[in-house]
Image (cartoon, grey):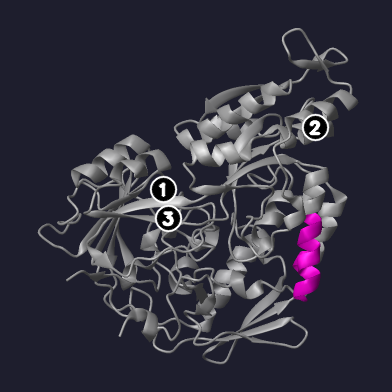
Amino acid sequence: MTSRQIRGAAAVAVVLGMTVAACSAPGRGAGNENSGDSVVIGVASEPETLSPLLGYGKDGNSKLFDGLLARNADMELIPALASSMPEISADGLVYTYTLREGVEFSDGEPLSPADVVFTYRTVLDEKTNSTARSELDAVKDVRAEGEDKVVFHLSYPYAPFAGRTVLPIVPEHIAAEQDPNTGSFNTEPVGTGPYVLSSWRKGEKLTFKANPGYWGGAPEVKTLTMAIVQDDDVRATRLRSGDLDGAILPPNLVATFKDDDSRKTYRATSYDNRTVTLPTAGEVTGDRAIRQALDLAVDRGTMVDKILDGAGRPAYGPVPVDDPWFAPEVERAHDPGRAEAVLDDAGWTAGADGIRTRDGRRAGFTLLHPSGDKVRQDHALAYASDAKKVGIDVTVESATWEVIEPRMKDDAVLAGFGSTGDPDFGLYTMLHSTLAGDGFNNMGRYDNPAVDQALDTGRRTQGQEARKAAYDTVQRELLKDPGYTFLTHIDHLYVLADRWDGLTTQTEPHEHGFASGPWWNVEDWKPKG
């Protein structure tokens, strides 16, 4: 019996949320030499914290923790720490969860309703620097009832609320004794998940050991090492040499493993889009005609073919074209001729060098992209090339995120967004005006009252038909008033040694690599043969 069967549903989609850099050969395993039950994965980055109280694993992506619910391979919600799906009141304002019996934290202490209440109340506390708090806006109160029940009271009917209860649960007996923002729990976590943290060498690797007391059954992969290898080429080289069991790679490097029979390639569809933010405060990017022209000028199909090698889809907005929530009427053609007409009508006149001006102002701006990200760099360069053809001068500049963040208000950024589970999960934080300038939320400070109203309707309405109409409105408004230029939705590609059975992929969010991949269900892998 697999742990998926033990869990009483399908695979618990608790996606991996960590990273590391290892030097062990795949058949030997970090810290477990001469063992075939270890796996070493190469990823590009690591989390800043391992505490769910600060947002780690808020979408269910952790091997250290579990939520009340989880998602299976088909992204369906299934019970995890809850013994069944929640009971929901007729008015959609009360959700009651019954906890699974016999679950213990990795330190041997039993899970209780008090742990769930503590977790949610701490995240909702404004003194806690949690990235998950705005996503729990509907929660008015959470309380324990008896020895095994937790009850959430909502301030308004929030249709996708159950999907928010994949939030990992932390032990009150440890975390309550610390400041959630600075305490040792951030780097020394204790959870109910299939693995425990063995060591964390910042910037190098995280190593996890199987939790022998895991309620879903002890994993057969006994050691999991996540190697932090920022450079794509280095990850590919280490994978090819046998230093890594698997890695996330861009399409051009995945192609180099095409004829390697000892490894398999996995392709995951995603909500992850590559997008140019167009700050409304910018003297050029703040002009709607400029934004509309750029939306028409960009050649999305060529980006998919040339940059992604076909591993993706054109993005006509934040919702993928193959998603049930996509509004088909917003799909549009590459039309540079119409882009030029829009600029002509708005008074942007082409000069001798082909670049347009209006009232003495040149139609130019800077586009930042994170250094070291070849896929984003290629998107930025292609975008600049397309823009120049219609008379807009885009200067591409690479920088670290530390440099980019304070400039986001004024400069365009080649960004990445996308959350799975429900349109509200990603669109609200990206587009709602109340979150303008809130860290990486609404980076371009987009402000459109019609979009705000539709997002509020989608968030506060239960009926599926009414919600679909609201998100159709959001997509149509973005076509008329594009605060971003959406370029592509990318597929995530992974290459792994073909030594284990049970590998699958999910539809993935923007956060990927360490947060998802074929190892999302590593606790269920079985050795081949």
Question: In the visual, does 469 lie left or right of 201?
Answer: right
User: Does 305 sit above or below residue 208?
Assistant: above
Circle 1: element type: loop
Q: Which residue is mark 2?
A: 338
Q: Amino acid at mark 3?
A: Arg
Query: Can residue 447 be seen in the rendering of this structure?
Result: no
* Closer to us: 390 or 358: 390
Q: Position of residue 390 (x, y in %)?
A: 73, 23
Which residue shows up at 66% across the image and 73% down it?
A: 161
Q: Which mark is residue 523?
A: none
Pick whichever of labels 1 and 3 is earlier in the sequence: 1
Pick whichever of labels 2 and 3 is earlier in the sequence: 3
User: Does 495 sit above or below residue 76?
Assistant: above
Query: Can residue 104 be seen in the rendering of this structure?
Result: yes
Q: How many tags in the picture? A: 3
Which residue shows up at 51% across the image and 61% down it?
A: 507
Q: Which residue is mark 1?
A: 46
Judge whether residue 465 is colored magenta.
Answer: yes
Q: Position of residue 214 (x, y in %)?
A: 33, 77
Judge whether residue 325 is colored magenta.
Answer: no
Majority secondary structure of magenta residues: helix
Which residue shows up at 53% across the image and 26% down it?
A: 398
Part of the protein shown in magenta:
458-474
Q: Which residue is mark 3?
A: 267
Q: Marks 1 and 2, how far apart in space?
A: 43 Å
Q: Which of the two marks, 1 or 3, is nearer to us in this view? A: 3
* Proximity of marks 1 and 3: CB atoms separated by less than 8 Å: no
Pick whichever of labels 1 and 2 is earlier in the sequence: 1
Near mark 3 (Cα within 10 A), the count class, few <14, some 14-19 or many ≥20, is some
Circle 3: element type: strand
